[in-house]
Image: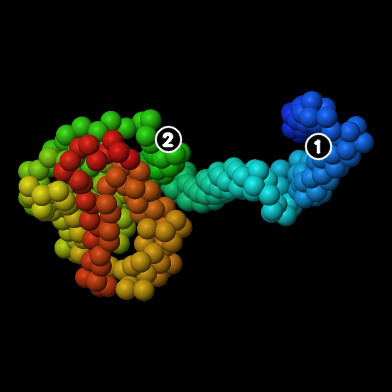
Amino acid sequence: MSFWMYVRSALSGVLIMLAAVGALDLVLAVSGTPWSVTLLADFLVLAAFVLTLLVAWLRRRGFYSDLAHGASDVEHPLWITEMVDPPDFAEGELTYGALRAISKAANDDVASYRRQVADYREYVETWVHEAKSPLAAAHLMLENLVDAVTDGAGPQEAVAKADALEEELERVEGYIEQALFFARSETLDRDYLIRGHSLRDLVTTAIKANARPMIAAHVSPVRRNLDLTVFTDDKWMEFILGQLIQNSVKYARPQGAVVEFSGRLLGEGGADERIELTVRDNGCGVPEADLPRVFDRGFTGENGRSGKRSTGIGLYLVRRLCDKMGIGVSADSVEGEGFAVTLTFPANKMHYFEH
């Protein structure tokens, strides 16, 4: 920023000073002061004013020059405050502070969107890899079914092969549904409706939707104390419960496997009144070291690495959707005895509209 540019920006001050000098000359002339004295006074006043302008310009020149250079030449303008030294004058400090606040907010938004894109890309890559397995199995089973029918296999054998084929196709449908809910979770606030629902009805619907894998794994559902009403979206809750059921089925014990759904009302009548739904199984459980990370994206743990076809997405989506819907979620486990997830529904429906 040149000195004359700064003077133009301070033009109102210059005009006021010139008017003040003219008024001073008039007062001195009326009082009979000699012109030599008047001219000296004018010179001193104007010199002091020009010196003041010059000092103020020198203090501001570096900041505004760096700012102009950064705005035009910096590759990424969001980092402009990192390229400019903090000024030592009041209006510059205000400008610098506002730019830092804007830059921080913009950079936070950019970082958030980048994380979302990276998460989604990584999930899609995982999803494609996992979806190939049941599709390949389905193709193989279809070929075996055709061969069996061609070779004159009995109805029971053909039905068994057809059931196995349908099971693999349902796995693909499950992966597709999971991908859809993963994509929709970014805009959940525009796609859910909070209403009062019977906890028993929500659990029953989820059990029916996952009946086939539960039957195949010989997992028995148990329902206790579910005559309670919770405020939630039934579609999203069915998906959340479905992920918990599928997780329990995946790690079910060979015999006597059970998934228990139990509800309870806590803090009745108080400000912290809430309803808890615990989904507990008696499967292999989770090692204590893995428990704090079971809701992390992509985390499969020791059990997932032992050939259980785990993607580490199901429980991550449960936590993600619950956080967006204002539902508390926590996990508990004893290795070798079972795994439990507890969902906490605030009893006050207005809680959800505050999220």
Instruction: Locate residue 309, reporting x and y percent.
Output: 41, 58
Label 2: which secondary element: helix
Instruction: Locate residue 257, reporting x and y percent.
Output: 19, 61
Dividing the picture into quarters, in which one does residue 19 lie? Answer: top right
In the rendered image of this protein, does residue 224 appear above or below residue 35?
below
Q: Is residue 77 left or right of residue 205?
A: right
Q: Nearer the viewer, residue 293 or 312?
A: 293
Q: Is residue 8 left or right of residue 193?
A: right
Hey, what amino acid is under mark 1?
Tyr
**In the drawing, what numbered circle is on residue 187?**
2
| Residue linked to disc 1 | 6
In the rendered image of this protein, does residue 307 appear above or below residue 124?
below
Q: Nearer the viewer, residue 271 or 99?
A: 99
Pair 2/1: label in front: 1
**In the drawing, what numbered circle is on residue 59?**
none
Q: Nearer the viewer, residue 329 or 247?
A: 329
